Image: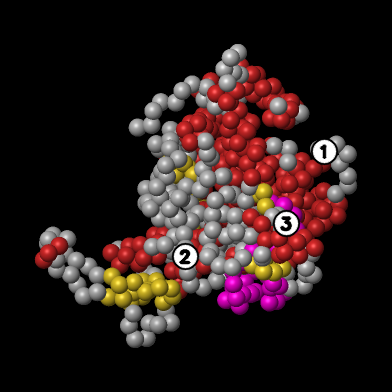
């Protein structure tokens, strides 16, 4: 009854959708004499119930013991407060009830990279004042770009206050930790994540204004303007500048292997070293042999590697003498920067993302354009016309630079640009849809990208790339957040037919797998339409939860034509074929 009530309470366009889903759910209600449990196992209702209850299951706060747990790190639970902040009563209660050690950070932080995480004795959770939704599984903290998609799902679910609290948490991060962080753990104090915060704020602000009895929000607008401007400036100064292109890049301030990757990605860096050892043409300077004078070039663990003649039998194998190698400091810089991009792991920025920090990426610069346009809008809401003009000028300049460096007219794709080699990449990646999502693509550019949809599209949706590398952010994997970005981009330029079809492909993939195992996952194999994703590179599980997939399901379903929703409902009411 709660689900039906929430559907009925929708307004306008949502109300039409709600009535249809209500009809569809009623149409498959249990027949007289049939158990309620059996009836609930069919149609869309179980998955919508799962998502609705999931928001509470995935919510964390500083009064909740489960918020402290970090599946990525084996260490004592520690909660860190900003240096300048007194200990709140809620934290005192948490410390007492959950056996949590509470510490203050060793210094005030004004900018990202200002503090070295080596100066923090034990890794721990960073304090946030409001409740927040985590992705799920090993990701038990509030993430930067995940939260944008989660917030959109919360707004679809009319959880406006929870969404607003998450936005205010990010403002708190900017004010006390120097930037919007990858997530609120101490080992993330060296990097951010793709800057979706302005989009988050604008969506929540507009939703707040539509609520009954909405009050004047000038103070919140002023805070948003100041904090978003500060976060934006981090991306537009060194070391986040992409050479002399005028564009920006991903860049992590830390050194060596990232602390959070060591436990759950055991063996990953050995695979990287082996790959570069066997593919020296791609190794560049990323592999350092342990020889006198090379100690300062390498970082992390050492690996013993050797080449054996595969043509001989194991009993008489002819092998070169074993040699000791370490991955270089620059490789780890690229690896960490890849993690700031969110696309960990992909071969988009070279093998294993090793050259991420050498690229001006399509995704990041599209997001910065969107941030400039959002700050222009916020300026207008505040009545600051001069500021609005300045932000508009910045956005137009960035649009020109994106066309100059990232647009390939002949192929009809947006590509990343390696500013070190002065060459445009030819790696076809789903980030080509970001300029459409952000609204910066010209009609001609958008038409060319839309015509290339067929290059990506699979029976289960849009995969990340056209290259099968074994990495989870490449073919054959599709992710709900990028399905949302791509489909929003299609709709923005009027291609509703393709948007509807791709939405249905992904929705049915998620729904089919949900009705098999009762869970929603972080990613799907969109070629086989399966949640059995066995990525070879990165962490080796398909995490259950899952925040942005839950949001994608609600968002894509909401914009789907009623006839297609009915078709999906009917298909999910039928017995699934046996898994092969």
Asked whether 118 or 498 is in front, the reply is 118
Asked whether 107 or 496 is in front, the reply is 107
Q: Are marks 3 and 1 in contact (CB under 8 Å)?
A: no
- Side of 451 relative to 208 (left or right): left
Question: Circle 2 sits on which residue?
Answer: 262
Q: Residue at x 61, y 19 (%)?
A: 29
Find residue 280 and report its horizontal and vertical position in percent. Answer: 30, 67
Q: Nearer the viewer, mark 1 or mark 2?
A: 2
Circle 3 — which element?
Answer: loop
Q: Residue at x 71, y 27 (%)?
A: 1
Q: Which mark is residue 63?
A: 3
Q: Residue furthest bottom?
A: 292
Q: Is residue 118 inside the magenta stretch?
A: yes
User: Callout 3: 10 Å neighbours few (<14), some, many (20+)?
Assistant: some
Sequence-wise, the earlier of marks 3 and 1 is: 3
Find residue 572 and report its horizontal and vertical position in percent. Answer: 52, 25
Q: Residue at x 71, y 58 (%)?
A: 62
Q: 179 above or below 364? A: below
Q: CA distance from mark 3 to mark 1?
A: 28 Å
Question: Circle 1 sits on which residue?
Answer: 211
């Amino acid at each position: 009854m709660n689900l039906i009530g929430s559907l009925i309470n929708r307004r306008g366009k949502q109300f039409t959708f709600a009535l249809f889903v209500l009809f569809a759910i009623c149409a498959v209600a249990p027949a007289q004499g049939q158990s309620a449990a059996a009836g609930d196992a069919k149609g869309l209702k179980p998955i919508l119930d799962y998502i609705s209850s999931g928001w509470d299951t995935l919510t964390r706060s500083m009064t909740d013991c489960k918020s402290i747990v970090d599946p990525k790190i084996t260490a004592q639970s520690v909660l860190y407060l900003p240096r300048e902040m007194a200990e709140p009563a809620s934290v005192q209660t948490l410390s007492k009830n959950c056996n949590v050690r509470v510490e203050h950070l060793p210094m005030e932080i004004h900018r990202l990279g200002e503090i070295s995480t080596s100066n923090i004795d034990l890794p721990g959770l960073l304090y946030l004042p409001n409740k927040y939704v985590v992705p799920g599984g090993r990701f038990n903290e509030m993430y930067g770009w995940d939260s944008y998609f989660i917030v959109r799902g919360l707004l679809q679910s009319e959880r406006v206050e929870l969404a607003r609290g998450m936005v205010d948490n990010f403002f708190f991060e900017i004010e006390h930790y120097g930037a919007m962080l990858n997530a609120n753990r101490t080992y993330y104090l060296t990097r951010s994540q793709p800057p979706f915060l302005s989009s988050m704020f604008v969506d929540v602000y507009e939703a707040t204004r539509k609520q009954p009895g909405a009050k004047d929000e000038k103070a919140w607008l002023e805070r948003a303007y100041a904090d978003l401007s500060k976060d934006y400036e981090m991306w537009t100064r060194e070391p986040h500048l992409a050479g002399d292109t005028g564009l920006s890049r991903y860049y992590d301030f830390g050194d060596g292997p990232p602390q959070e990757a060591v436990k759950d990605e055991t063996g990953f860096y050995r695979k990287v070293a082996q790959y570069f050892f066997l593919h020296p043409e791609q190794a560049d300077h990323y592999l350092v042999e342990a020889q006198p004078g090379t100690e300062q070039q390498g970082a992390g663990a050492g690996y013993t590697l050797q080449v054996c003649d595969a043509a001989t039998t194991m009993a008489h194998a002819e092998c070169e003498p074993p040699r000791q190698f370490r991955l270089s400091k620059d490789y780890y810089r690229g690896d960490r920067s890849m993690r700031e991009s969110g696309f960990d792991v992909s071969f988009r920025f070279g093998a294993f993302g090793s050259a991420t920090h050498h690229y001006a990426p399509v995704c990041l610069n599209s997001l910065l354009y969107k941030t400039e346009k959002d700050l222009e809008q916020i300026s207008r809401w505040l009545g600051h016309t001069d500021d609005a003009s300045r932000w508009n000028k910045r956005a137009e300049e960035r649009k020109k630079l994106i066309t100059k460096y990232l647009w390939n007219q002949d192929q009809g794709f947006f590509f990343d640009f390696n500013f070190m080699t002065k060459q445009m990449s030819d790696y076809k990646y789903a980030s080509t849809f970001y300029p459409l999502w952000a609204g910066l693509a010209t009609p001609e550019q958008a038409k060319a990208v839309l015509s290339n949809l067929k290059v990506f599209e699979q029976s289960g949706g849009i995969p990340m790339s056209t290259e099968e590398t074994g990495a989870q952010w490449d073919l054959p994997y599709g992710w709900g957040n990028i399905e949302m970005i791509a489909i929003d981009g299609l709709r923005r330029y009027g291609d509703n037919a393709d948007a509807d079809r791709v939405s249905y492909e992904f929705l049915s993939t998620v729904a089919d797998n949900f009705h098999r195992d009762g869970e929603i996952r972080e990613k799907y194999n969109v070629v086989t339409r399966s949640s059995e994703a066995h990525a070879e590179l990165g962490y080796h599980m398909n995490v259950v939860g899952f925040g942005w997939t839950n949001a994608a399901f609600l968002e894509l379903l909401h914009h789907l034509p009623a006839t297609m929703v009915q078709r999906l409902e009917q298909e999910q009411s039928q017995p699934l074929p046996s898994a092969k």
